[in-house]
Amino acid sequence: GDLGFSGVGDWVSAIEFDYIEDNQHPFYDGWDRYHFDSAPDEALYGRVIERVKHNEGGKFFLFVSTLSTHHPFVNPENGEKSEEQTFRYGDKQLGLFHDRLMEVGFFEDGVLIIFGDHHAMVPLKKGEVQRFGTYRAAARVPMIVSYGNKKQAVIDGLHSQVDVFNSLKNLTSSTLRTSDWVGDIFNDKPAKYVAHRRGDYRDVISVFAEDKDYLVKLDGDDTRVIDGDAVSDEIKEELVGRVNAGRVMGGGE
């Protein structure tokens, strides 16, 4: 897509990627364009395979942002405006991409991590709310870690996107680092708390624990846990302290 959108180009430069490209690369010449002036996933994954081959034999990390399944939903194969068709297209192209990675030997010592961005622009469905509750349903995004055909497991702990970086860091470290707020996916070490910056009420942070949900109201020096009559002062202090620290650090740890 267009790296000028929302300052993405400046962001990837600031976190020091060695090589960056966007929708202006000649590989995408001749492809139809969609939202964010993006080429479809089929084209994107073809370009990624080229980059994988280019880096063959060396250590590398690729970050790829797909856009075909972004709202508004348009199936690139037929132009139909349908959420279901668009995600079927996205799933198919992702499956074909996975097969190509198998063919080029990527999984001999590589890992593919697939995860969703956010749920903010898509209304909750009745089944989601019934299964997860309103607050958690709005925070859930898909995530898959693939080692090719080497292992299979389902991880059902309390994890978040914050854990992705920490989990990768732990893979290359002699120590396993986690905290109450940052877990490790690969070692199935869930965090005690997960904070979710919501897309509906921007002044409220949802905080999830294993068996309880909390709401933290952002209100300057009066930032507080709301609906918290049954919450101990110790937990209130911990939640508010961590949310305030995250605001100072820009959400990271």
Image (cartoon, grey):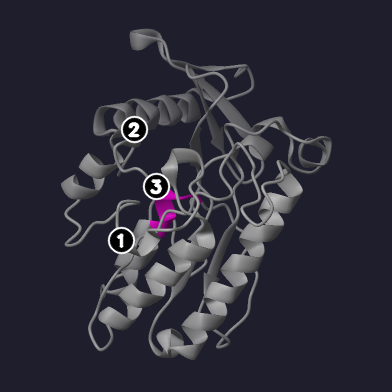
The residue located at (55%, 18%) in the rendering is: 201
Could you say whether the residue bearing mark 1 is in a helix, strand or loop? Answer: helix
Magenta segment, prevailing SS (helix, strand or loop)? helix
Residue 181 x/y as whole percent: 42, 45
Closer to us: mark 3 or mark 1? 1
Could you say whether the residue bearing mark 3 is in a helix, strand or loop? Answer: loop
Q: Is residue 52 above or below residue 90?
A: below
Crowd band around label 1 with a 10 angstrom C-alpha radius: few (<14), some (14–19), many (20+):
few
Q: In the drawing, what numbered circle is on residue 26? A: 1
Which residue lies under the disc numbered 3? 1
Nearest the eye: 81 or 237: 81
**Amino acid type, callout 3:** Gly
Q: Is residue 225 above or below residue 52?
A: above
Crowd band around label 2 with a 10 angstrom C-alpha radius: few (<14), some (14–19), many (20+):
few
**Amino acid type, callout 1:** Pro
Give the distance between the C-alpha atoms of the residues marked 3 and 2, in whole angstroms: 11 Å
Residue range highlighted in magenta: 160-164
Nearest the eye: 201 or 106: 106
